[in-house]
Amino acid sequence: MGLKTSISYSVSTLESQRDVSIGKPWNTFLPFPVQVVSAIVSTDLITGVQTVNRYRYHDGHYEGSDMEFAGFGSVEVIEKGDDSVPSMITKNHHHLGCNEKEISISLPQKEKFRLKCLRGKLLKTEVCGLDKDGKEILYYTTESKWDTKVLNTSDGREFTVPLLTETRTMHFDKDAEVFRINSIENLEYDKYGNVLLQQQKAFNPHEPSDSKTLNTRIFYAVSSEERFVNKPSRVIQTDESGRVVSLTLRYYDNMPEGLVGTKGLITNQEFLALDDETVRNIYSEDIPDFESLGYHRKDGEEGWWAFGTSYQTEDIEGVYTGRVINSFGDVTEIIFGSNRIYPEKILDAMGNSITASFDLRANKLKTLTDANGCTIEEKYDALGRLLYTVEPGTNAQYPTVKYKYITDSLPVCILIEKRPVNNSPETICHKLFLDGSGNVIEERIIRKDHEYVQRSYVMSSRGLVKEQFLPFIAAGKDYRKPQSVDSIKLVYDALGRPLKITNPDGTVRSMEYSGNTVYIYDEEDNREEGSSLHSGTPQKNVYDATGRICEVSLNLSNRFISTKYTYDIKGDLIGVYRPEGSKTTFVYDLSGNPVAVISDQTGMSVFVNDAMGIVREKRNGKGDKVLFSYDSLGRLKEIRNGKTAEQTAQYTYHDTNNPCQDLSANLNYTLGRAVRVVHQGGEEIYEYDELGRIIKKTISSKYLPSRQLVFDYSYRADGQLSSITYPALSPGSGRRKILYEYDREGRLLAIPGFVSRICYNARGQRTEVHYNNGVRTVYTYDDRNLRLISSVTEDSKGNLIDEFIYQYDFVGNIVKIDSRDEKISTDYSYDDLYRLTGAVTKSGLRWTYEYNDLSDITFKSDIGELLYDSNGNVCKAGNDLFDFNEIGQLISSSMGEFSYDSSGKLISAVRGNERVDMTYDHQGRRIALSYKGPDKTTEILTPDEMIYIEDNIMYILIFDGNLCIARVREDNGATVYLHHNHLGSTSKVTAADGSILQSVYYDPFGAIIENIVAVGAKEVRILFSGNEYDFFTGLLYMSSRYYCPKIARFITPDTIVPDLYNPMAWNRYSYVLNNPLKYTDPTGHFWKEIGDWFKENWKVIAAAVAVVAVVVISVVTFGAGLIGVGALVAVGAGMAIGGVVGGIAASKAGGDILLGVLSGMALGGAAALAGAAIGAGITA
C-alpha cells in the first residue's frame, strides 16, 4: 500500500537516567534493563506524510518476591504534530500491584495478593497539548478508582477480582481551571462481582444548577447451577429526584423474570412505556385505547408496558431457523444454510422473501434475490475484493459496476467503471488513489482527453484533513501531489477541534474555545476591522455539564441574543427558550418517543404511539385528530380524520400472503410494494421494474371521471430518468414522450425538442443552456469560491433578454446585482445576523426591514409596522389585520377567510363573493384548486407535478432536473420557455420564436412588483423560487405550506425545525432566515443555500447540522453507513418492526438489527435492491 513503519527501541535504564536528569528519579525497583519501544514512525511513501508516536516510560518495577516484572507506573505517548495540528501528549498511569508509597515494605500475603490483582489497571489518564513554545496545556484527566472483592465458588474456593468503583473525568479550560466533571460510580456489587447500583453524574463546579444525575439499579437472572450469573434481568433508571426514566425487563430461554435456562439466550424483552402520570397529564381528556395499541398493564407495576422484540429458534431436520417477533406478534423468519452461519432466506410477515447465497471463500454476499425473483450478483477476487456488481437487466459481460485494483505501482489505485446503459460497452470511469494507510487521497473522473480531479486531500501527521483542493485537471494519469492549486486549509488544536479554516479565496472561518464556551467567527467576522460592517460579531455556543449545547447566542451589534436549550437525563430535548419569553417544550414516553409538543403559537400537539413507537394518532390544540393504521410490515395502510372518520388515504400492497388481484395493471415486480393509493382526489396505481422503480403511474381523478391519466417512465442503469411519456390529451389520442440525454459523465446534456445543449465547465457547473427557440443562457463563476458571477440570457440574434451580475460579501450574501435592466439592478444590506435590512433598485424602488430578537419582521417599508399578539402571531401589518386560531393558522385577513383540514392543509379561502377550494393527495400535495367568483369560474387540476389542467386545457411541464424550463399546451402544441434568476424565480418567459411573452419583477421577499404579459399570451404562474403563485390570495404554494410574500411570512407554522441550534430556525413563520437572496425553501420546511458548491460537492468536515422535527424529534440510523442504513430501514426495520414511520426509528421500540444481516452484507446495488424488494414503508 505504500506505508513504511519503523520501530525504534530503548531500554529502561536510559528511561530512568532521563528522569533522574530532570529531577524525577524513580522510587521503584528495577534491577535489570527492559527493552521498550521508544518510537513508531509511519511514513507514507506517496505523500511523504510522517506519523510519529514517541513513548516515554517512568517508574518501572520488578516484584522480587514474585520474581515478576510489574510493568511501568506511567507511560507517555507523544503524537507529533505539524503545522496544522500541534502535538498531543497522553499520560497513562497504571497500578503496579504493590504498595507504591512504601515499595520496600513487606506486606501480608492476603494484602499482597489483593494488590497484585490490580496490577496494570489504569489509574489516571492526562491529555495535554503543546503550545507554540512547547509548554503543556492540560485538556482533561480521567481518574479511575479500584477496589477488590473476594468471591467464593460453590466448592469452597475463593478468588479475588478487581472492581472499578469510580471513573471521573475533569475538563480544563486554557487557564487549567475545571469547567466540567463527569463521573460514573459503582456503588453496590453482588456476590458475583456484578454492579447492582451505578450512579452517573455530570456537573459544572461553577454552576450548581448545571447538574445531572442518573441512577441505574440492576437485577440479574441466575441459572440454577450458577452457570449464568451476569445476565441483566431488570434494569431501573431514575433521575436525581427518584423519578423512573427507564424500566426494562429481559427474559432468557423463555424462563420467568430472574431465571436463566441452559442456553442463556434473550428470548423476550418488556419495558415500561408510559407512566400513569404522563398519561394523566397528556391524555386526561381523551385517553387512547392503549391495549389496542399493543400495550398492557403488568401485575404489581404501574403504567403501561409493552413487549419488545422476542426471539425463537428451532432446528428441524437440520434446518436452523430463527424467528423475530414484534410487539404485535408479527413474525419474520430467518432461515440459515446448512453451515448455520449464513442466513439464506428471510421470510417476512406477509410471506415475501429474500434469498441469498454467499461466497464462502470471501465471506461475503454473492447473490441477493428479492420476492419478485430479481437477483443482484456480486463477484470477488482471491483477496475478497469486489470485482463487479450485476443488477437485473444486464449480465457479467456488461456488469453494472466494475472494479479494478491497480497495485503494481504506488499509490494503489481503484478504477471504477459504472455503466449508465445496460448491455452497452460505454462506461463512466472514476479513479480513486489511496495513501499508504488506505485513505482516499484523490478522486478523479476520466474524460475523453484528460483526467479531472474532483477531490484531492492532504492529511496531517495526525490523520486529520489538512488541505482540500479545488477540482483541477490532472497533469497526467499518475498521482502527483497538487501544486499551485487553490485549496481549503485547516488548522486544529491538539484535540483535533478546528481552529481556523482558510478558504481558497483567502477568507477565514475560525473557532475559539474557552471552557464550556465556543466562539464561532465566520468570514465576515474575521474581516479586517473597518472593512466590514459585521467584523467581530461571533456566535457563542455554551455547553452544559453533559457536553450538550445549552445556549446559542447570536451577536447583533455586539449584543448577544440568547436561545437556551434544556434536556432530560436521557438527552432528549425538553425545552427551547427564546427571547421575549417564547418557548417550546417537549414531553416523551419512557422509550424516548415524543407524546406532546407545547408552544406559544400552536398550543399543545399530542401524539399517540403504539407499542413499537409508531405514531398512530396526532392531535392538535383545537381538537383535530388524524388517525394512522399500519399493516404487519409497518407500512401505512390508512389515514383518517379522527373527528369525522373520513378516510383521507388508503394504501394497497401486493404481497405473497395477501395478493392484490383486483387490478388490471401488470403486477410484475410488485411483491412487497404499494400498487394502489386512494386519496381524496382519486387514486393512483403503480407498476415497477426489476429494481423497484415506478415505470407506470395511472391516475384516476374524481375531477376527470371519464378518463385516466397514464405516465410511463424509463430509466438508465445508473438510475437516471431516460424518458417520460405523458398522458394523452383525450382518450385514444397520441401521447407525448420526452427524452433526456446525458453526456459521458452522466450529466444532463439535452432534452430533445426543448433544450438542444447544456454545457459544463471542468468543475461540473453549467455554463450554457441552449433552448430550442434559439435563446441561450450563459453562466460564469468565480474561480476560487465557485459562486455564480453572472447569468446572461440572449435570443438567437444576440438581443438581451435577461442579465444578472452578482457581487457577494465574504459569507456569500448578495450585496449587489448589476444589470442593464434598472428594475433588476439592486444594492442590498444586512444586519449582523445576515437578515436583509435594505434593498435599493437603480430604477428608484427602495425597501427597508427591521426585526425583533425572535427574527420576526417588525417593519417593512412598503406596508409599515408589523405588530404581534401575545402568542407571537402577526396581528397587524400596516393597515391590514390578521387573525390566527389557537394552533397558529391564519384564519382571517384582507386576503380572505381561511379554513384548514385536520392535517393542517389550507382547504378554502373566501373573500366576499369569491371562493377558492383546494384538494390534496395522500402526500399532502395540492391536486385541485377551484375558483368561483361573481363573473368567473376556474378549475385548475394538478394530478401530477408534471402536468396541470386548467379549464379542461392540459399543459405539460418540462423539468431539467432542477427547474421547470418549458410549458406545452397540449391541444395546439404551443410551447413557452421559462428563464430564471439565481433563486429559480421565473424572470422571463419566451415564445417559440424567442420573443418575450412575460416579464416578472419581484421585491426581495417575492412579492410581485410588476408582471408584464404580452397580449394574447397565457401567463405562467410558476414564479418566485419556482413556486406556484395564486393571484386570488396573493399567496405562494410551497408544497407543504403557503407563503405570503406581502408580509414575508408563512401563514401556518412549520412542522419541522430544520436546524436545531440555529435560533432563527425556531421562528416557524419566517421565510429562509429572512435572507431571501441567499436561500430558497423548496418544500416549505427547509431552506437551501443557492449555489453552495462546497456543501453540495465536498465531503463534510464539520459535524452535520441536526434536523429536529417539531412533530417527530429524531431519526435513528443505528450508526450505520449509507449502505447499512438503507438496508436496515428497508429490510431490518421494515419487515418485522415497521420501518421508519414519521421519523420514529424501529430501534426505539425494540427493533432488531439482526434483520439487516442479509442486506447489510450487500455491496452497491444489492443493498438497494434489498430495500426495494421488500418495499418496507413504501407508500408510493
Image (cartoon, grey):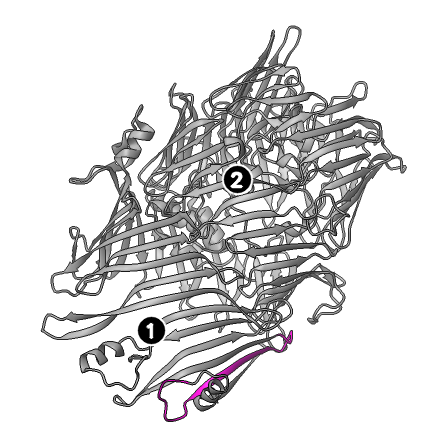
Query: What residue sits right under mark 1 in the picture?
Result: 121
Question: Quick one: SS at disc 2?
Answer: strand
Residue 17 lies left or right of residue 777; in this view the side is: left
Q: Residues within 10 Å of mark 2 (few under 14, many from 20)?
A: many
- Say if 20 sits above or below 700 in the image: below
Q: Residue furthest bottom?
A: 32
The boundaries of the magenta stretch are: 26-49
Instruction: Please identify the quarter of the rendering in which residue 978 is found.
Output: top right
Based on the picture, tell me whether residue 43 belongs to the magenta stretch. yes
- Tell me how far mark 1 sits from mark 2, CA to CA: 44 Å
In the rendered view of the protein, which quadrant contains the N terminus?
A: bottom right
Q: Is 128 in front, or is 40? A: 128
**Residue displayed at 56% across by 26% down:** 926
Q: Position of residue 448 (x, y in %)?
A: 74, 61
- Say if 573 sits above or below 392 in the image: above
Instruction: Please identify the quarter of the rendering in which residue 264 is found.
Output: bottom left
Query: What residue sits right under mark 2 in the picture?
Result: 563
Query: Of callouts 1 and 2, which one flags the residue occurring earlier in the amino acid sequence?
Result: 1
Q: Position of residue 613 (x, y in %)?
A: 35, 40
Count of numbered badges drawn on the protein = 2
Q: Position of residue 680 (x, y in %)?
A: 48, 23
Q: Which mark is residue 974?
A: none
Q: Is 53 in front, or is 990? A: 53
Amino acid at dot 2:
Thr
**Residue displayed at 38% across by 47% down:** 1133
Q: Position of residue 447 (x, y in %)?
A: 72, 60
Asked whether the viewer can see residue 427, the reply is no
Question: Quick one: SS at disc 1?
Answer: loop
